[in-house]
Amino acid sequence: MNKPNLCIALGRMVDPALGLDAVGELYLAEGRVCAVRAEGLSLGALPEGAVERIEVPGALVLPGLIDLHVHFRDPGLTYKEDMESGCAAAAAGGFTTVCMMPNVKPVTDTAEAVAALRRRASGINALPVGAITMGQKGTACTNAAALKAAGACALSEDGRSVADASVMRTAMAAAAEAGIPIFDHTEEDTLAGTAAGEACMAARDLILARETGAALHLCHISAKLSLDMIRAAKAAGYEVTAETAPHYFVFDQTRATEGNFKMNPPLRTAEDVLSVIEALQDGTLDAIATDHAPHSAEEKECGYAKALNGVIGLETAFPVSYTALVRAGHIPLSRLVALMSANPAAILGDPLRGTLSVGAHADVAVFDVAHPYHIAPASFRSKGRNTPFAGMEVYGKTRLTIAEGQIVYQDT
Ligand SMILES: [Zn+2]
């Protein structure tokens, strides 16, 4: 497709990787960042030929957001979401790269399945995650090297843990050999849903990763017990990264009374919420992911006990995080950009994303943080409406999303 030369002008460009926080102009050509201009700063060369100028005075101009954890329900459960609606929701939320968990039907456990999903990405960079075991049954390991060669960005058993420690050790050794990270759902089955269950499995897998050399990334961490463990492991030199999701730093368990507040791990105590915020501040947590998990209305609006686990998040993650963390004074804006873009890019081992550096992919997200608005699920691109954030007043509406130099979302 023909990609126009673009200039995003008058916005506040923030890129922690570049140490950039300045009002200026960002030039994009041939799917790449080609120049950055601000007072006292001149990087790269201006594009040749005509340039389409898009003025965004007062808005934030950030590297496209990267979500390490989404469920697009495709193939097999496309009444909840599909590749197209999932990618459209991502673009509407300022995300230009997402990692799609393998718990679809059939499970993404072969090179063919990975390659087929990879080809179907629509507009944005949608990366398949391969399963750790065949059919996510917890016994026979998938072929880590073949999944990676087909385009898998990570291996995960998300939705459950690999209960058998020896199977997990074998899988981690193969993943280390293949050079592919493990995105780890940490839940000890006999303590399912509890903070202790999350922390016990995190501890087991920290040990196995240390022994095998696997690159371990811990998914949707919600409990102080786990964060204490991760903090100690990092201090001891363990190579581990971890993510949380916006609902874990906004809501505590007192809100867990209706379906749209039900997810796994569940909402926890007020003390856990504070500890998640502290871990976002001190670097114990490396990333904010959404765990975007669409369900139909029937599956969620049936009371807390009966509702399926999971909430959507792609179209609310930035405004909710910006409002609850940056505007609330918990972290600076540059830290939020690191948590939602630069750090996830590093976890994926992709130095050409998560930054506005010259030569990087032209992945850009532009947000209006000057005007508050109310989250309105009816406007979502996602097929899902199962958000706990409906009606919340937030700052950070997406104005424009550009993926590899193409405009994939524009607020009208
Ligand atoms: Zn999970």
Image (cartoon, rainbow, N blue to C red):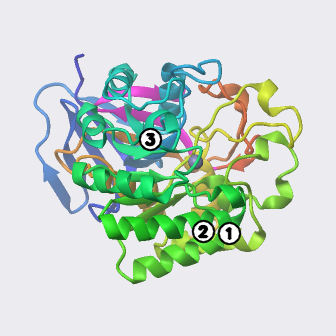
Q: Residue at x 62, y 43 (%)?
A: 316
Residue at image point 77% right, 68% down: 269
Q: CA distance from mark 3 to mark 1?
A: 24 Å
Near mark 2 (Cα within 10 A), the count class, few <14, some 14-19 or many ≥20, is many
Q: Would residue 146 be found to the left or right of residue 284 on screen?
A: left
Q: Is residue 208 visible?
A: yes
Kind of residue sitting beneath label 3: Thr
In the picture, which quadrant includes the N terminus? top left
Tell me the residue that label 3 is attached to.
Answer: 133
Query: The residue under label 1 is which amino acid type?
Result: Ala
Residue 401 belongs to the span the image colors magenta = yes
Q: Residue at x 61, y 57 (%)?
A: 187
Q: Which mark is residue 199?
A: 2
Q: Which range is magenta?
A: 395-412
Residue 25 in the image: state x and y as whole percent.
28, 46
Looking at the rendered structure, the secondary structure element under dot 3 is: loop
Specify the quadrant of the image occupied by residue 268. Answer: bottom right
